[in-house]
């Protein structure tokens, strides 16, 4: 045992690196079967599923489920979460309580669950009980992963702690794995190249929500749309983000914050978005039919801004000037390594719906099946 190694000499079955949607689904699928630990680098679980902090259920991360996304539909149903139609767009639905409600429900499940491995020895019971109580840890960035035998892998944390397991599942953006984690022995060059060139969809986008303490004042045909971004015009898409309970109404903008008047000034970024929308209405029939709409747009009561590019464990570029293309399926990103001891989840590794929440769930299901086939 090294000086920084966990005192428990019994290896875990699985270490999950990354506490976003995909990592949490893997943990949920394994919850009552094997001994696992989930390590999240940041202080928050959920990855890019984030709501505002005022309790209005305004999504600041992933938001929509489309009709063909059966895994997401099944997930929210299994968690007892309701959905509702996206205002002005019957082709997509949103989640009651916001997408972060998924994270809350899964974490609640996992905190109530307990390992039930019949192979536990009596003298190990106390150690296992302690591990069960701390199976999810935040602020635990992984810096290295080593193959220490034909059946055992270790992960080293930035703190110097070392944990051992039979399998390690990486459920975080491949590009960030390539940037921040060292592998001994090195991963194949084809895998490293694929990870280095991988992009995380929407990681460079800052979401801005303008919240109004009033009923929606815009016509249904102006509730979702696109913009041409430019100088002082940071938004390229907007949608009606009002929660299902009607407690407030909201407009949310996808933006490139670098185009704003003041990139790190949330108030200025919000004003730029409002003015950009007002400008887009200047010659439309909307303005003629709703002459007070511009004044309403400018009179928002709250703003909520989430600068995803500045999240160290989400984006590799804090000041993007362009929108990355939607990822394409890449078999190399999904392939296990080290004879199946290293597995790769996360939406970018999905071979059907990479980049979106459906891909995160798909990849978690795939990894769970790989674990079941390889050792259970």
Image (cartoon, helix red, strand yellow):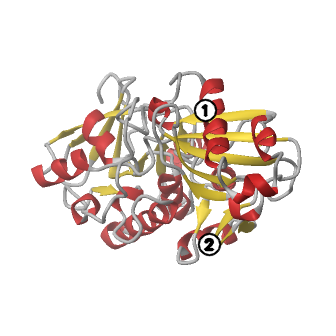
Residue 73 is tagged as 2
Question: Which mark, by number, is residue 366?
Answer: none
Is 313 or 38 nearer to us in this picture? 313
Vertical comparison of 138 with 158: above or below = below
Quick one: quadrant of the C terminus?
bottom left
Above or below, 360 against 66 in this view is above
- Left or right: where 182 falls relative to 20: left
Sequence order check: which comes first, mark 1 or mark 2?
2
The residue positioned 82% from the left and 48% from the top of the image is 291
What's the CA distance linking mark 1 and mark 2?
35 Å
Q: Which mark is residue 272?
A: 1
Q: 10 Å neighbourhood of mark 2: few (<14), some, or many (≥20)?
A: some
* Circle 1 or circle 2, nearest the eye: 1
Locate residue 111, reporting x and y percent: 66, 49
Asked if residue 199 lies left or right of residue 359, the reply is left
Query: What residue is shown at x 39% (from left), y 69% (from top)?
Result: 366
- Which of the pair 118/345 is nearer the observer? 345
SS at mark 1 in the image: helix
| Residue 110 position in % (x across, y down) | 62, 53
Which of the pair 31/124 is nearer the observer?
31
Image quarter of residue 116? bottom right
Residue 65, position as x, y percentages in the image: 59, 67
166 vs 255: above or below:
below
User: Quadrant where the N terminus lies?
Assistant: top left
C-beta proximity under 8 Å, tags 1 and 2: no
Name the side, left or right, on which 164 lies relative to 195. Answer: right
Element type where label 2 sits in the image: helix
């Amino acid at each position: 045992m090294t000086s920084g190694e966990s005192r428990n000499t019994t290896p875990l079955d699985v270490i999950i690196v990354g506490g976003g949607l995909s990592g949490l689904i893997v943990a949920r699928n394994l919850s009552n079967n094997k001994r696992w630990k989930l390590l999240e680098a940041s202080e928050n679980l959920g990855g890019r599923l984030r709501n505002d902090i005022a309790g209005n259920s305004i999504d600041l991360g992933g938001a929509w489920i489309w009709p063909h996304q059966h895994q997401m539909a099944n997930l929210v149903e299994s968690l007892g979460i309701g959905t509702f139609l996206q205002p002005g767009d019957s082709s997509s639905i949103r989640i009651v309580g916001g997408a972060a409600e998924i994270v809350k429900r899964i974490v609640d499940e996992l905190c109530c669950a307990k390992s039930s491995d019949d192979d536990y020895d009596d003298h190990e019971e106390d150690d296992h009980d302690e591990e069960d109580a701390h199976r999810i840890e935040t602020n635990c960035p992984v810096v290295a992963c080593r193959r220490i035998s034909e059946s055992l892998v270790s992960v080293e944390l930035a703190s110097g702690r070392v944990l051992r397991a039979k399998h390690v599942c990486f459920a975080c953006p491949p590009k960030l794995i390539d940037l921040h984690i060292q592998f001994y022995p090195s991963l194949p060059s084809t895998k490293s190249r694929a990870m280095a060139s991988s992009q995380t969809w929407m990681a460079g986008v800052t979401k801005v929500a303008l919240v109004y303490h009033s009923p929606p004042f815009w016509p249904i045909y102006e509730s979702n749309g696109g913009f041409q971004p430019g100088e002082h015009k940071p938004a390229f898409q907007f949608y009606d983000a009002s929660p299902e309970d009607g407690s407030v109404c909201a407009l949310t903008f996808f933006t490139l914050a670098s185009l704003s008047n003041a990139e790190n000034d949330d108030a200025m970024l919000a004003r730029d978005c409002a003015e950009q929308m007002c400008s887009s209405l200047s010659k439309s029939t909307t303005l003629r039919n709703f002459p007070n709409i511009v004044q309403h747009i400018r009179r928002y009561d709250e703003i909520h801004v989430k600068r995803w590019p500045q999240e160290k464990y989400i984006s590799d570029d804090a000041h993007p000037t362009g929108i990355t293309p939607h990822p394409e399926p890449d078999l190399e990103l999904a392939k296990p390594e080290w004879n199946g001891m290293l597995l790769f989840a996360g939406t970018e590794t999905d071979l059907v719906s990479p980049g979106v929440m459906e891909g995160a769930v798909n990849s978690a299901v795939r990894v769970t099946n790989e674990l079941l086939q390889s050792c259970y």
